Image (cartoon, helix red, strand yellow):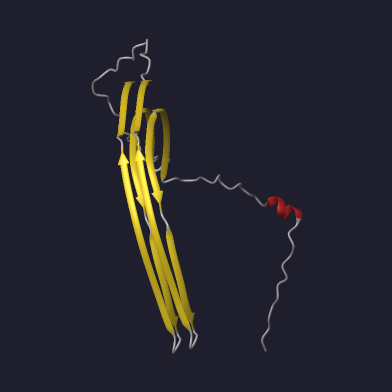
Amino acid sequence: MDRTTEVTPLPLSADDLAAEVGSALPTKEVYSLLDLNVDLDLALDLAAPIDLAVAANANVAAPIDAAVGANVLSTDSTAQALSDQGVAITQGITGDSTAHSTQDSAIDQSEPVPTTPPAAQTGGIQAVDIPDDITGALDGGLLNLDVNVNADLDLTAPINGAIAAQANVAAPIDAAVSANIGSTGSEATAVAQQQAIITQDITGNATATADQISDVDQ
């Protein structure tokens, strides 16, 4: 016969609870492998005066004639397309195309001269302290990077341009399209006739002049 002895746990008394001792958890520390500190100071002086002159004489003519006929999935059908175009174009330009651009830029981006001279820097070899205690070798990050950028930029780009053009453009287009698709016993006819007489004449001068004077002090 097996005998099982069951022990019933007794609850803690007030004296037992008072005898218990607790301690606060230590403050959680965050360890960083990379300590990066970047200070960026930019002073930008930007100047880009732009001067542009454009003169143009142009004649454009584009007569277009088109005819399209199609039979799609049809039998015993006829598709005919006829396009007839007669064009007589006379273009004449008499005159001068002149573009003149004058730019005079005076830009001062110089910094004022400081009245107080900078402090003299002492030369020589500086002593470096070599630590003899390695207990704090892991204090802080493994890589401490401190970057200080101080840039003063003076950018100047004076741009001057002049464009003069004379042009005659004529583009007569004549097209006729006829198609039978998926059909039997069909006839497709496309006829395109074009007669174009184009006369283009330009009389004159195209002149582009650009004068630029830039006085830049940086």
Front position in the image: 153 or 133: 153
Residue 61 place in picture, x, y as percent? 40, 51
- Image quarter hosting the N terminus: bottom right
Task: Kindly identify the residue that appears in the image at 35 percent across and 35 percent down.
Answer: 95
Indicate whether 213 appears above or below 56. Answer: above
211 horizontally vs 179: left or right: left
Residue 55 location (% of width, % of height): 37, 35
Q: Residue at x 74, y 65 (%)?
A: 10
Q: Nearer the viewer, residue 98 or 138?
A: 98
Question: In the visual, does 109 lie left or right of 1?
Answer: left
Check the image and report above or below for 160 versus 185: above
The residue drawn where x is 33% and y is 41% is 166
- Where is residue 198? Give x, y as percent: 34, 53
Q: Nearer the viewer, residue 187 or 217?
A: 187
Q: Is residue 48 visible?
A: no
What residue is shown at x 42% (from left), y 37% (from top)? 37
**Residue 84 against residue 95 in the figure, above or below:** below
Give the quadrant of the C terminus. Answer: top left
- Quarter of the image holding residue 195? bottom left
Can see residue 190? yes
Q: How many marks?
A: 0
Image quadrant where residue 32 sits = top left
